[in-house]
Image: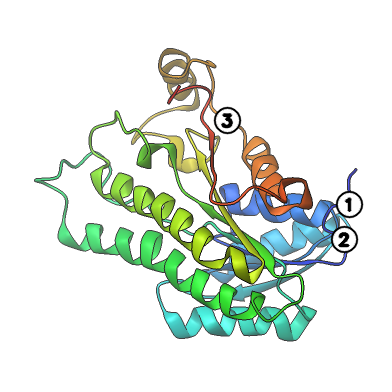
Amino acid sequence: MSHRFSGRTALVTGAGSGIGRGVALALAREGAQVVVAGRRRAPLDETVALIEGEGGKALAVTADVSRAEEVRDLVATTVDRFGSLDVAVNNAGVLEGRGRTVGELPEEDWRRMMDINVTGVFLALQAEIAHMRTQPDGGAIVNIASRIGLHSRLPGVAGYAVSKAAVSVLTRSAALDHIADGIRINAVSPGSTATDMSFKPGETEADRAARMRAEVPLGRVSTVEEVAAAVLYLASDDAASVVGADLVIDGGSTA
């Protein structure tokens, strides 16, 4: 097992399940002390228990990333507890109104996706950068975008696609703005991944597997572990010259 993150502190938002939990576990396994954040405490406590069960160090902090004060407090708590913020993974996101066309999508669903998926990443970046730029070694930030934001061939996901496209553009802009501060900012754009979000309404595991064989050149969904490996690469010193990249993990869907 590599220990690329020994002695480093990582913050992962949306870490109560899915990709966020997988990333938090992977970081802890490679030596990081991890703060896991989200809106609901119980799933975060489960993530902490999994990390501690493997001998790692973790702290759960509830926060709504769409609220600037809560995000600033989240970063402050991270630094107060562990002394630094070396890696941040901005993963928190929602998919609302799936299956609704642009003409049908409720305004409240649109606004919720923009508030969490776009403004949430923006506010997290601001708070993370404010601290990282004071550190001698800066830091690394990875935003979780989506292949849907790069090349969406799916109907009924316009709001989500727009929000994730914005994350990709924001990542590139922020990367150029802050590389001089010693902060590397990149993104990962997963395709269909083995999480609850990859299911269509009413779809079974077998249904999803059949759909993936037809839709994805690789013939399957990506695993959470595969996405986490991409995140850890971008956050590590192995990617020291990677700035403003958007690493697509989608089994060839956008090839």
Q: Amino acid at mark 1?
A: His
Q: What residue did someone put label 3 on?
A: 222
Question: Which label number is shown at residue 69?
Answer: none
CA separation in Å, label 2 and label 3: 27 Å
Q: Amino acid at mark 3?
A: Ser
Residue 155 image offset from top left, x and y in percent: 23, 33
Q: Amino acid at mark 2?
A: Ser
Q: Residue furthest left?
A: 103
CA separation in Å, label 2 and label 1: 6 Å
Q: What residue did someone put label 2 on?
A: 6
Q: Describe residue 82's horizontal placement relative to residue 252 as left or right.
A: right
- So how many labels did they put on this image? 3
The residue lying at 61 percent from left, 67 percent from top is 180
User: Where is the N terminus found, in terms of image quarters?
Assistant: top right
Residue 170 image offset from top left, x and y in percent: 42, 58
Mark 3, Cα crowd under 10 Å, few <14 / some 14-19 / many 20+, is many
